[in-house]
Image (cartoon, rainbow, N blue to C red):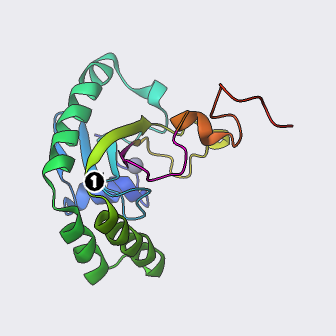
Amino acid sequence: MTFKEKCTFCTIYKNKKEIIYHDMYFFAIFDKYPVSPGHVEVIPKRHIPSIFDLTQDEWNMLFQTISHVIEIIKKTDLKRLYKKFIECPLNNRSIQFCKKMIINLENNNIIQGYNIGVNEGYVAGRTIDHLHIHIIPRYEKDVHDPIGGIRNVIPGMGNYRKPVSS
Ligand SMILES: [Zn+2]
């Protein structure tokens, strides 16, 4: 297995502390700066930056891994999870994210959908050079207008039923 010193995800895997799931090729953790309650990262055990570095066997396993992880998200008491994260915080920013999640869960705690995706390359927003697949649960009315989902990574281009604003 490849391990990179100073890599956030390699270190988490080495310490085996926060891991909520693992199989032959991947492990998963709850994100400590969650976009929405239950936000998880699925991460290859090998230190590889790109989804295109996955082997055929890893690719074949990936969606099975994701569906197992989704079952775990559904069974987790998320409010309790974020309270625990706040008790042993990573930093002040993480506390803010986790507090927001508790408020969101008080409004709506029924997961009704997911965005699943990768920021492939720096131009796509990658900040950590160890591949991670975001699983972002979605809740009814968590945004004003969800149409287009991940199409909204380019603001204004999400809804293909509307004209492009210049
Ligand atoms: Zn790594």
Res. 124 image quadrant: top right
Chain part drawn in magenta: 135-146
Q: Residue at x 81, y 37 (%)?
A: 165
Above or below residue 83? Residue 117 is above
Between 14 and 165, the one lying in front of the other is: 165
Position of residue 67 measured from the top left corner of the image (x, y, whole percent): 22, 32
Res. 120 visible in picture = no
Above or below residue 103? Residue 131 is above
Assign a secondary structure to mark 1: strand
For this view, does 1 lie left or right of residue 148?
left
Between 24 and 73, the one lying in front of the other is: 73
Magenta stretch encompasses residue 67: no
Q: Residue at x 21, y 41 (%)?
A: 69
Magenta stretch encompasses residue 137: yes
Res. 101 visible in picture = yes
For this view, does 38 lie left or right of residue 72?
right
Q: Please tell me how crowded label 1 is: few (under 14), some (14-19), or many (20+) other residues with Cα within 10 Å.
A: many
Q: Residue at x 18, y 53 (%)?
A: 20
Between 122 and 35, the one lying in front of the other is: 35
Position of residue 96 measured from the top left corner of the image (x, y, whole percent): 44, 76
User: How many numbered circles are shown?
Assistant: 1
Quarter placement of the N terminus: top left
Res. 145 image quadrant: top right
Quarter placement of the C terminus: top right
Position of residue 122 measured from the top left corner of the image (x, y, whole percent): 63, 43
Position of residue 25 measured from the top left corner of the image (x, y, whole percent): 24, 34
Above or below residue 47? Residue 151 is above
Between 52 and 156, the one lying in front of the other is: 156
Residue that numbered label 1 is attached to: 29
